[in-house]
Image (tube, helix red, strand yellow):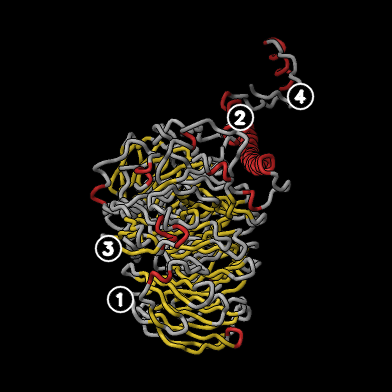
Amino acid sequence: MWPRSPHPPSPRPNRHSLSSHHRGARKMVGGASPPPVTISRVLDAWNEMIENENHSLRDRVGDLEKKVHEQNDEIMCLRSTLADVLRRLTVVESSSSKLAVGGGRVTPTKEDRGTVRLRHHHNSGGGEGGGARDVSKRASSYVPTRPASSTANIRRPNSGSLHNLSALRGVSAPQPHVTSFTRGREAQYNGEEGVVKLYLRGRPLNLYVPTPLRETYSPTGPSPAPPAKLKVEWVYGYRGRDCRNNVYQLPTGEIVYFVAAVVVLYNVEEQMQRHYLGHTDDIKCLAVHPNKLIIATGQTAGHDRRDARSWRLNPPTDPLSPEAEEWPHIRIWDSVSLHTLHVLGISDIERSVACLAFSKADGGGLLVAVDEAPDHNMSVWDWSRGERGYKLLETKCSADQVLAVDFSPIDRNTIITCGKNHISFWSYDSGMLAKRTGIFENRERPKYVTSISFTDTGNVISGDSNGNLLIWHRGGNTVDKMVRGAHEGPVFSILVQKDGTIITGGKDGNIVEWDRDLERTGNVTQVPEQYGAPRVVTSGRGSQLVVGTTRNCVLEGTFTFDMRPVMQGHTEELWGLTPHPSHHQFLTAGYDRTCYLWDTMAHTIVWSKDIGEPAQSAAFSNNGDIVVIGTTSGRWLVMDAETREMYSRHQDGNEPIQVLKFSPNGEYLAVGSRDNYIYMYQVTEGGRKYTRMGRCQGHSSFVTHLDWSADNQFLQSNSGDYELLYWNAGLCRQIVQTSQMRDVEWATSSCTLSFNTLGIWPEGADGTDVNTCTRANNNSVLVTGDDFGKVKVFSNPACFQKARCLEYGGHSSHVTAVTFIHDDSRLISTGGRDTAVMQWTVTSTPTSSSSQH
């Protein structure tokens, strides 16, 4: 309805009055005729009025659209606030549950804020699929249990809305399951001699049973359940060295990223972490849904699925079965409850998931994935359809490496991929994908297109290995504009902000801001060299930027204030680990030539030190003033633990120093080398002076583990060929009569081959599967780390062949070291190639609870 004129209409004259009016008018002007009133003039006036009204209408519609967008942002903020409130309620209820059951603290602490859901090798019917849930128990960290029957318990949310309140809060804390292991050949016990034979790869190893147990011992005797359980408290590290687009700021204030097989949700302000532990091996990519609540992560093939030829032959029928875990797949999960919602791609994805992206123009209904098969297959999924999603189509993407994939935020069916020698524009329509390759025309063709993003007008912006930025025509495959030399070297990341400004990060360490026309605004910041180059740049809180770097650091900062690290990690294989003897601290040393001293309470680095060569092992002196670090070249270094002053350097052979161990009284140091020898040193001047006493010669393979006796007189050692030898430490001589050592009390239990550790070896073990072993200082618990990324908890001693244990995942590589801190309140574990350091809280298990398993 058109608006009324502001003036009231005059009465319509009749024909006679009109003619007399005109006659009177002619008389008034002295006989001159007025201009005729034509239809065209009336139409022009009418059109002008319509145009004015249309212009006003467009302005009002524009204002309404702006208000709708503002309300959408407010709704997103409210949803995020609700999600954060629900998370906090979960924490409080979990703490209240603990208080009601065990009389714990009223105020929830950081230890109470995250509960690790256990993942078990053998499912005994518990968890979500078996038995009734105790709804009074809530968990903040969650590992999906595998139901006993199919996948009936997977949630199917509406991708565009929050789950209902009860669904978000209904996360039950499962009771741990105790597993047992046996070998193909049973251990044999000779009661007369008190010797049990343990077979590893068909080779017998004689272990002498302590005198008090000789009469009653049987290798198949009943094994007690572990008296303690673990819970992930903190994960140190980030994977930025070879992954992209894997750091995001969530509306709840948490930064989400991954390392090893763990997705970390880190609230920097509150200094709190939560962890999603649904994966079994290396996570390679991450995508956040447009609603900012749902997250997709993709992993590589598990430890038991390395043979690519067998992937498609026998796919598992249950996507949540233990077999399915070992296939490369995509997990879609809720960032509030940490529940797994869908598992995609089992038997469809080869080798690994390289990159992921949710659609944007349709509200996130689709998910695109590219794997690391030879042809880099690209698949598009209706991810919320069914328990395993629904694959709409699959096509070969490129014979060359694909580095990134993304949906257009405006054109619903447009997908962009880029990588080595290509950038491709895909159109999805009627179940078909049409591909157009980007045309560079007379511009230099880069070896790699390293990053892509979209401007606010829908144009594609790309960065390449030559340091150039290009804008591509929307809907086309030709270049509209090019900026040469935006960075010196590859452009790793492109961020388009809400106001249209563009931020890029490059291998040169620079983070540069551009306006919407790709003109420099003058805002530039440099990432300090020790943190690496910015691999991914994303928006943080307010004007802050969150940066993931090539040296496995996560930084926060602005163009005004310098970047500061909120998470640091090792960048190469990690083996050295030692706890401080009296503080809540521990030291790690890796092949990246760096040593870090960590504080377990503050969750921060106390100091770091570049020692100039790869490190293999480390040990604190008994008073904690000195730290000794063994390297891969046979050199070991003596350093002040506080000032980092280097006191001395020593050389024993040219092979890596595998293990360093001080005697209980601190007067001796045993140095185990890969050259098969154990070098003995006398320690004086408070750990600053070392005098060589001799070397222990007798192993036929490299030394792997050492233990001192409690009286400082003897050593026991393992080697790479499954030997267990004993030594007189003062004389540096082997004790041949090993039966004499059956009743020796050992100060530590790090040897994986001994009577006390007989039960840690799983079925089919070949002697190298278990890399590390440690005993709690109170002697009640034994913990191991193995080649399959598992940390296992046993009752000490684990001297029965069918020893029961609790099994925990999180590492995606061989676990190289485990150790308790001085008061046994926490356990530290290190991964080899995954470079992750995991901190676990240790909780005693009630005897009544243990007896139920």
Residue 28 relative to residue 581: left or right: right
Give the CA distance from mark 3 to mark 4: 109 Å
According to the picture, the residue beneath numbered tag 4 turns out to be 7
Residue for point 63% across, 43% down: 87
| Crowd rating for badge 4 (residues with CA inside 10 Å; few <14, some 14–19, many 20+) | few
Instruction: State which tag comes first along the sequence, 4 or 2.
Output: 4
Residue for point 49% across, 35% down: 128
According to the picture, the residue beneath numbered tag 3 turns out to be 203
| x and y percentages locating residue 22 in the rendered image | 70, 19
Instruction: State which tag comes first along the sequence, 2 or 1.
Output: 2
Residue for point 43% across, 30% down: 152
Nearest to the eye among marks 4 and 1: give it: 1
Residue 756 relative to residue 446: left or right: right
| Crowd rating for badge 3 (residues with CA inside 10 Å; few <14, some 14–19, many 20+) | few
Q: Amino acid at mark 4?
A: His
* Disc 2 secondary structure class: helix
Give the CA distance from mark 4 to mark 1: 110 Å
Give the CA distance from mark 3 to mark 1: 15 Å
Instruction: State which tag comes first along the sequence, 3 or 1.
Output: 3
Give the CA distance from mark 2 to mark 3: 96 Å
The answer to whether the residues at label 4 and label 1 have Cβ atoms under 8 Å apart is no
According to the picture, the residue beneath numbered tag 2 turns out to be 50
